Amino acid sequence: MKLRDYSKGLIEGLQVGGIYEGPEAESIVRRLAVDVLELKDYQFYSEQNKELTGPQIEELDRDGEKLLSGMPLQYVLGYESFCNHRFRVDPSVLIPRPETEELVKMTVETVSEGDSCGDCCDIRNVLDACTGSGCIAWSVAAAIPEVQVYGFDVSGEALNVACRQKVPFKGPRPVFLLADLMDDPPAGLPRMDVIVCNPPYVCESEKAQMRRNVLDHEPEMALFVPDSDPLGFYRGLFHWADILLEPAGKVVCEINERFGEKCAQLAKSFGYHNVNLIRDINGKDRYISADRRH
């Protein structure tokens, strides 16, 4: 079987199954073929007449069946690219999204700005709340080797994934611990200079707008909050910040676009200032940054 014929069949299967539309189905199949056959992206098109070997067909068929069942490609491959690194993922953790890369960028810029203003502003510790796969924690640690990064999650399975990431870094290894943002911080944590957080923020009522491959495979506890209390995790975040954040520290977090102003007001109600509501690449309210000290 030629690569062209296999690709055409799987693309059509994904389309007929209603899992992906045309261009997206092609992109999914291209990425699968590139990974399994160890090709460059351009070779997927230049080698359409490539004859597939028996073992290659068997592997493609196994992975193709998973895709046809609705499993996200990232879980099929076992990784996702994020901030120029490859992160392990499985159904115990959310798949890292492009908009969260901007949250990492904001965190790195915050650390860099603080470090440039003298010894009194040196940033030593960064906390990643609700770390999941650890993609934020590891990306910050890799970008700024001078800082110590901590990450925590309520899911032991997620922490197992976070601890096993293999990201090149030159500074101290991130420290991961089991904790719940809705409880008090555990004893022994140092004071933090920056707290970054991408908590669950999708309302239960928004499920109807989401794809089945997300609903059926990604962990609900990392995605959804009750409609009756959509800002609960943010209250927990600012409670942790009140206990752990240095006086000149900063909180940066990702939010539900529906609650931008309410999240900003919540930060102000905890006494934070310079509260900025920031839009993502799609023009949606997606992030909050807030300073602790007036």
Image (cartoon, helix red, strand yellow):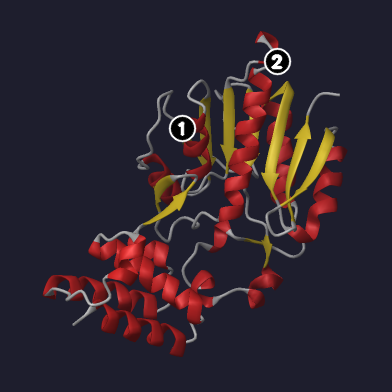
Residue 178 seen in the figure = no
Q: Is residue 6 above or below residue 217?
A: below
- Splitting the image into 4 quarters, where does residue 55 fall? bottom left
Question: x%, y% of residue 179?
Answer: 54, 40
Query: How crowded is the residue under tag 2: few (<14 C-alpha within 10 Å), some, or many (20+)?
Result: few
- Splitting the image into 4 quarters, where does residue 110 fall? top right
Question: Label 1 belongs to which residue?
Answer: 142
Question: Label 2 belongs to which residue?
Answer: 117
Q: Is residue 21 above or below residue 90?
A: below
Identify the residue shown where x is 53% and y is 42%.
136
Identify the residue shown where x is 49% and y is 38%.
139
Q: What is the secondary structure assignment of the residue under circle 2?
A: loop
Would residue 186 be found to the left or right of residue 13 on screen?
right
Disc 1 from disc 2: Cα separation? 22 Å
Identify the residue shown where x is 81% and y is 41%.
276
Residue type indicated by callout 1: Ala
Would residue 235 be found to the left or right of residue 158 on screen?
right
Residue type indicated by callout 2: Cys
Quadrant that contains the N terminus: bottom left
Residue 108 seen in the figure = yes
Along the line of sight, the residue nearer the viewer: 26 or 265: 26
Question: x%, y% of residue 89?
Answer: 40, 55
Question: x%, y% of residue 188?
Answer: 55, 23
Would residue 49 be found to the left or right of residue 243 on screen?
left
Question: x%, y% of residue 289?
Answer: 75, 39
The extreme left residue here reads 54
Query: How crowded is the residue under tag 1: few (<14 C-alpha within 10 Å), some, or many (20+)?
Result: many
1 or 2: tag closer to the N-terminus: 2
Q: What is the secondary structure assignment of the residue under circle 1?
A: helix
- Splitting the image into 4 quarters, where does residue 238 fall? top right
Q: Is residue 21 above or below residue 271?
A: below
